[in-house]
Image (cartoon, grey):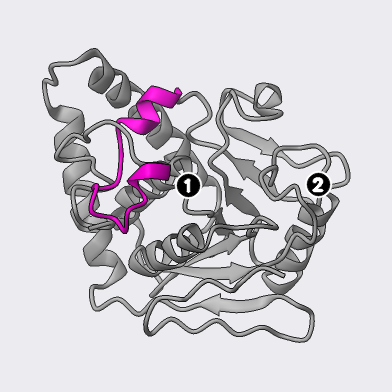
């Protein structure tokens, strides 16, 4: 049996009789709007900058494409019907930062944003702690569901993963208003090559029905790693670290992961 990772202070996780855990409620002293406004300013400044490396120019181009997909999702769906599949990974972090940066344009914001976390069967305690603490910092109302199998890396990627299907099914039953879920799938991920370039794919193959929105689908490994958490983040640079990030982009320049 796996040890349960220590949870961040002031974040409560409750498990109901179905095995699903109640959402983590944000406890940050900064409001969601304040966070999103700061991220918007930093992302805008980065996109307007005359950067000096090919990698950062590629990140600018990818970010603009991702923001276009996220804007389209916000146009198609009311904010309460959007959720995020979050596991604390670098792809998810890039997606989350860009998503948050567009939310100041919304007429109103909740105190926390809907999200689902499906842990792997054998998680590292440090990674679990990072996922929960970063969700807390980024104002995610994190609903935790167990996949009950060994394939928790294939969430929303289209094939297999019976336990994943059940986890999403239970999540959608508990959150009937959710119609679309942002996912951090990239083209090189399993089944990523089957996804549409426009960033929108309805689930199929026996999965519970929802729209998968994948804004970072065309990002490459080196571009994702150019947006890295600070090295002081609980030693996780060994697992999640990468290139030294641009000042406006270090998983949001210190706003979120510091």
State which region is magenta. 220-240
From the image, which quarter does the C terminus lie in? bottom left
Q: Classify 8 as above or below 124.
A: below
Percent across and percent down for residue 135 are 43, 64
In the foreground, 22 or 80: 22
Q: Quadrant of residue 123?
A: bottom right
189 relative position to 209: left or right: left
Give the crowd class for mark 1: few <14, some 14-19, many >=20 residues within 10 Å: some
Query: Horizontal placement of 126 versus 115: left or right?
Result: left
Q: Secondary structure at mark 1?
A: loop
Residue 82, compared with residue 142, is above or below; it is above
Quadrant including the N terminus: bottom right
Position of 83 relative to 90 (above/below): below
Whether the magenta-drawn stretch holds residue 235 is answered as yes
The residue at 56%/32% (across/down) is 199
Q: Quick check: is 144 in the magenta stretch?
A: no
Instruction: Give percent across and percent down for residue 44.
Output: 19, 38
Q: Is residue 56 left or right of residue 106?
A: left
How many numbered dots are placed on residues in this image?
A: 2
Q: Residues within 10 Å of mark 2 (few under 14, many from 20)?
A: many
Report, in whole angstroms, how far the alpha carbon at label 1 lies from the one at label 2.
Answer: 19 Å
Look at 36% across and 32% down and name the residue there: 225
Q: Which residue is mark 2?
A: 161
């Amino acid at each position: 049996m796996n040890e349960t990772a220590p949870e961040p202070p002031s974040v409560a996780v409750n498990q109901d009789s179905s095995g699903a855990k109640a959402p983590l409620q944000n406890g940050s002293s900064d409001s969601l709007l304040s966070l999103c406004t700061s991220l918007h300013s930093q992302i805008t400044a980065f996109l307007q900058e005359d950067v000096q490396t090919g990698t950062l120019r590629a990140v600018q181009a990818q970010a603009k494409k991702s923001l276009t997909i996220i804007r389209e999702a916000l146009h198609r769906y009311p904010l309460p019907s959007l959720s995020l599949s979050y596991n604390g990974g670098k792809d998810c972090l890039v997606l989350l930062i860009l998503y948050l940066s567009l939310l100041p344009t919304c007429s109103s914001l909740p105190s926390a944003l809907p999200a689902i976390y499906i842990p792997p069967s054998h998680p590292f305690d440090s990674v679990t702690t990072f996922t929960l603490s970063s969700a807390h910092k980024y104002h995610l109302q994190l609903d935790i569901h167990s996949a009950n199998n060994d394939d928790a890396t294939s969430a929303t990627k289209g094939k297999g993963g019976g336990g994943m299907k059940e986890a999403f099914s239970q999540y959608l039953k508990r959150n009937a208003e959710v119609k679309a879920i942002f996912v951090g799938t990239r083209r090189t991920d399993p089944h990523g090559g089957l996804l549409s370039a426009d960033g929108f794919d309805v689930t199929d193959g026996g999965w519970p029905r929802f729209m998968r929105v994948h804004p970072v689908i065309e990002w490459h490994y080196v571009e994702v790693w150019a947006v890295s958490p600070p090295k002081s983040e609980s030693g996780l640079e060994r697992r999640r670290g990468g290139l030294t990030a641009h000042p406006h982009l270090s998983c949001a320049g210190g706003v979120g992961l510091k």
